[in-house]
Amino acid sequence: MSKGKIAVLIEEHFDATEYKRFNEFFPEKGYEVEYISHLWGNDSLRFGSNPENDIIEFHVDVTTEINDVSPSDYKGIICIGAYAMDRLRYQVTVKKGEKNKAPAVEFLRKAVNENKVKLGTICHSLWLFCADTDLIKDKKVTCAHNIICDVENAGADVIYDGDVTADLVIDGNLITGKHPGVVEEFMVAFVEEIEKA
């Protein structure tokens, strides 16, 4: 019997290592994995992982429109790593002084405000949180070294371990991992945090 669903926000150029392990680990622990995205009026969209040596190893067909679900539908929500979360920040129109209104940012805003569901990021995926400083301000986090400036400029407190960022940081309902090399530790911690509630 399922313990519930874990939503994974995804778009083109997602991390292959995380994708592969999420599909193995979470079902083994009793959780369904549901990939969600903004589908731009389509019934489904197919996204590919980051190419390695010009080969796209994984594809995922997403049928769940992010506007049609609520954070409370899930036990946990993970933003997958690589460049997918940057793509999910995209807005068709923008106005000076207005907060980002991309559907994925609006969804994340609801999740943060409800503060009931566990949220997870690895590597570059904190980029989605950086779309609105209210989502990340004063949170203790870790991330890939090349987005430290974005994360700190958005008001988060990046935690260091010597002269590198920490492997894993848990601050309230937010679990952050440095890069795909810590995906195992991240997934174990994510499930532990879900099951504490």
Image (spheres, rainbow, N blue to C red):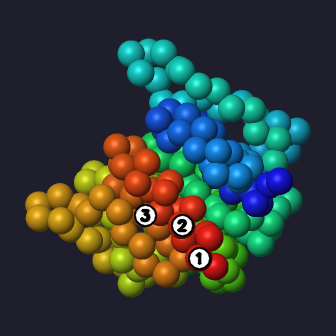
Residue appearing at x 17%, y 58% in the figure: 164
Name the residue beneath numbered marker 2: 192
Residue appearing at x 77%, y 44% in the figure: 39
Q: Secondary structure at mark 3?
A: strand
Name the residue beneath numbered marker 1: 196
Q: Earlier in the sequence, mark 3 or mark 1?
A: 3
Instruction: In the displayed orientation, state which residue is furthest to the left.
Output: 163
Q: Quick one: label 3, few (<14), some, or many (20+) residues within 10 Å?
A: many
Q: Quadrant of the C terminus?
A: bottom right
Amino acid type, mark 1: Lys
Distance from Cα at disc 2 to Cα at disc 1: 6 Å
Q: Can residue 185 be seen in this snapshot?
A: yes
Q: Secondary structure at mark 1?
A: helix
Q: Do the CB atoms of the residues marked 2 and 1 lie less than 8 Å apart? A: yes
Name the residue beneath numbered marker 3: 176
Q: Residue 5: give x, y in percent of width and height.
A: 75, 57
Q: Do the CB atoms of the residues marked 2 and 3 lie less than 8 Å apart? A: no
Q: Residue 169: give x, y in percent of width and height.
A: 37, 69
Amino acid type, mark 2: Glu
Residue appearing at x 66%, y 73% in the figure: 117
